[in-house]
Image (cartoon, rainbow, N blue to C red):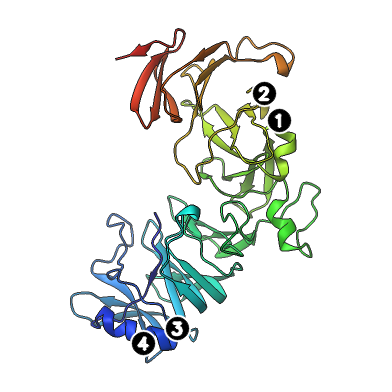
């Protein structure tokens, strides 16, 4: 879970800062000082944490043991700063800078929020914690920072960052209808590119933002994967998965979840790789007005194989890091667990897609299945409210 915290004045207690907040509209936090949590990072600096000095309007790194300023990161005139996160190597610090309009301590569980924050304006900023200075600023529309997913997602090597737009309204589904101002930041040349490629090559500039929220072949990034080996960034999208180049953010290709053509304007497709990395399975998320779909792609040829999922789709779990879909170790069998366990033999599929029905249907757990994997050849493992359970691939018999 990302951290989105207000900078505290070092040495002042929370109550004092809170007393100022109502007048200055600076919303405090009771979070402790926020040093880089990645102690094994290449640029980890022990005991240093960021502080905003209200007298000099400067963002600084302060030694926690002495209270002395070690480095000035930026001079900021805007009245509000919220930290977002550190890069994994502790070189960069990200935050939101702008003017907060209002906030509420109310927690909206039905949207997954922790609280409500409305901004007049807001930019996402990256700072260099090693040398000081502002590295990049990103226009970040959407008047509310939604807390379902961090607006800054770092690659494991800290050489790239995915910058995501905010949510335009409290009453929108921020996992689906957020503003599509998404950027790729590249550390090697300090460049940034906005993801804006449509299938026709037409730019999204000039389009209404409501249109941009729903365009096909553009990632929503409910799920992302940093494919450093291939130089790609994968992102879940309506009706498939978008793949972008890490060199410049351009669209490399779009893998369609083929049986879900009607889903391209709505239902998002997530993805999971096979254990040997040779296949990727796309599966649609259940959303109103759409049907389910699953397509298995061979990564060497980028050719897809569809199956008939009988209209079913995976339960909608925003930003889940587990999958109710899995391939067997030899990539022959596809197991899917939603309300039951269904199995396809991918090596013996009928010619017509509509005839590609499961060869097995097993009851599995009585609770809704969250995730599926092959624990061993011929053994399916499910996770649900009943816990972790194992089942025979061919008979469906529970394995104690």
- Nearest the eye: 155 or 293: 293
- Nearest the eye: 222 or 87: 222
How far apart, in angstroms, are the residues tagged by discs 4 and 2?
Answer: 59 Å
Q: Earlier in the sequence, mark 4 or mark 3?
A: 4
How far apart, in angstroms, are the residues tagged by discs 2 and 1?
Answer: 7 Å
Q: Residue furthest bottom?
A: 55
Q: Earlier in the sequence, mark 2 or mark 1?
A: 1
Q: Callout 4 environment at 10 Å: few (<14), some (14 to 19), or many (20+)?
A: few
Q: Earlier in the sequence, mark 4 or mark 2?
A: 4
Residue receiving disc 4:
20
Which numbered marker is on residue 25?
A: 3
User: Mark 3 or 2, which is nearer the eye?
Assistant: 3
Residue receiving disc 1:
258
State which quarter of the image contains the C terminus: top left
How far apart, in angstroms, are the residues tagged by discs 1 and 3?
Answer: 50 Å
Residue receiving disc 2:
306
- Give percent across and percent down for residue 107: 42, 62
| Residue located 47% across and 58% down the image | 150
State which quarter of the image contains the N terminus: bottom left
User: Mark 4 or 2, which is nearer the eye?
Assistant: 4
């Amino acid at each position: 879970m990302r951290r989105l915290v207000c900078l505290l004045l070092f040495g002042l207690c929370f109550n004092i800062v809170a007393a100022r907040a109502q007048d200055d509209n600076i919303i405090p936090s009771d979070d402790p000082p926020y040093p880089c949590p990645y102690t094994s990072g290449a640029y980890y600096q022990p005991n240093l944490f960021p502080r905003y000095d209200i007298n000099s309007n400067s963002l600084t790194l302060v030694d926690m043991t002495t209270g002395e300023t070690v480095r000035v990161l930026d001079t900021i005139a805007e009245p509000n700063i919220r930290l977002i996160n550190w890069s994994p190597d502790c070189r960069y610090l990200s935050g939101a800078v702008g003017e907060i309009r209002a906030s509420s301590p109310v927690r909206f569980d039905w949207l997954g929020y922790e609280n409500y924050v409305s901004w007049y304006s807001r930019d996402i900023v990256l700072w260099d914690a090693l040398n000081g200075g502002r590295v990049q600023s990103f226009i970040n529309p959407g008047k509310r920072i939604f807390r379902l997913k961090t607006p800054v997602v770092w690659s494991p090597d800290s050489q790239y960052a995915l910058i995501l737009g905010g949510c335009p309204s409290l009453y929108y589904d921020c996992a689906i209808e957020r503003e599509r101002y998404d950027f790729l930041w590249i550390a090697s040349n300090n460049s940034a590119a906005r993801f804006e490629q449509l299938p026709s090559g037409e730019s999204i500039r000039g389009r209404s933002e409501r249109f941009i929220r729903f365009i096909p072949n553009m990632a929503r990034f409910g799920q992302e994967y940093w494919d450093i080996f291939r130089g790609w960034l994968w992102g879940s999208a309506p009706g498939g998965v978008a793949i972008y180049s890490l060199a410049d953010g351009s669209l490399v290709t779009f893998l369609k979840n083929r049986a879900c053509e009607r889903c391209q304007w709505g239902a998002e497709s997530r993805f999971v790789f096979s254990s040997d990395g040779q296949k990727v399975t796309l599966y649609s998320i259940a959303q109103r007005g759409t049907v389910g779909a699953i397509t298995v792609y061979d990564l060497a040829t980028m050719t897809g194989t569809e199956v008939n999922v009988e209209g079913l789709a995976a339960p909608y779990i925003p930003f889940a890091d587990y999958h109710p879909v899995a391939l067997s170790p030899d990539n022959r069998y596809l197991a899917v667990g939603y309300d039951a366990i269904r199995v396809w033999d991918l090596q013996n599929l009928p010619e017509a897609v509509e005839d590609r029905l499961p060869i097995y249907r097993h009851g599995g757990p009585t609770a809704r299945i969250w995730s599926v994997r092959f624990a061993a050849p011929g053994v399916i493992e499910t996770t649900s409210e009943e816990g972790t359970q194992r089942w025979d691939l061919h008979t469906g018999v529970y394995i104690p």
